[in-house]
Image (tube, helix red, strand yellow):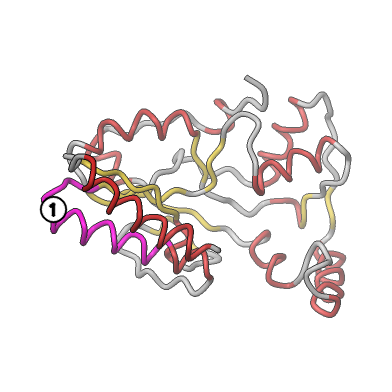
Amino acid sequence: MLYESNVRGTENLLNALLKVKKPRIFVFISSVSVYGKTSGVLLNEQNSLSAQDPYGKSKIEAEEIVKNWCDKNNIIWTILRLPLIIGANPHGNLGAMINAIRNGFYFNIAGGTAKKSMVLASDIAKFILKAAEVGGTYNLSDGCHPNFNELSHLISKQLGNSFVPNMPLFVAKLLAFIGDKIGPVFPINSDKLNKITSTLTFDDLKAREAFGWDPTPVLKGFKIHE
């Protein structure tokens, strides 16, 4: 499914564009998952693309398809590698986190100190128009890289709560061990625990130097409801 959507879907879109009218510029929304890392600090665009998971691999292949197609047809290409995208009423992992906090099922693990790169959707939209005229590959983030504790307390406060419980690491490891034995139906396993408790941030210096990228810090700009 991921291959069909991210790779074949990209190919089909590009081929269809040529049948209508060749564009002058093309912007592809990629993901920091292409780096294939579960931990690291301020990884930049020069880091190797070593993803082995289906999603990351499909994004790597789609990036190459876009670059080759654009170069062949003399089109300016821009690739944006994005971390967690923050916006009102989000879906995916962030939406699940909000629902878990709303329903009292969310726990930070080991203090929630792991930092993650994230960026506001509204800032991405503004940046696209600037970068599209120049082209290139860029990581984007808010430059602050909040941790789970900070983000969960912000969400909890907006939902009218004040308390976010914490799960000690040894308890989480025990549950992860059980999850390894039970399988995908269990909410956590060792792989998920490692991701949750590991810092993973990305450097956006290239965008800052090239375009004056100066995004709003997520903890200041994120509102669950518009």
* Residue 76 is a magenta residue: yes
Q: Amino acid at mark 1?
A: Asn
The residue carrying mark 1 is: 73
Q: Look at the image and give the residue range highlighted in magenta.
A: 59-77
- Position of 14 with respect to 54 (left or right) is left
Task: Give the residue drawn at x 24%, y 35%.
Answer: 211
* Residue 157 is a magenta residue: no
Residue 95: x and y in percent read 69, 41
User: What's the magenta bit mostly, secondary-structure-wise?
Assistant: helix
Residue 36: x and y in percent read 47, 68
Residue 86: x and y in percent read 56, 37
Question: Under tag 1, what secondary structure?
Answer: loop
Task: Give the residue drawn at x 30%, y 44%.
Answer: 27
- Position of 115 with respect to 63 (left or right) is right
- Asked if 207 appears above or below 187 in the picture, the reply is above
Q: How many numbered marks have been drawn onto this rendered protein structure?
A: 1
Outermost residue on the left side: it is 74
Residue 210: x and y in percent read 22, 40
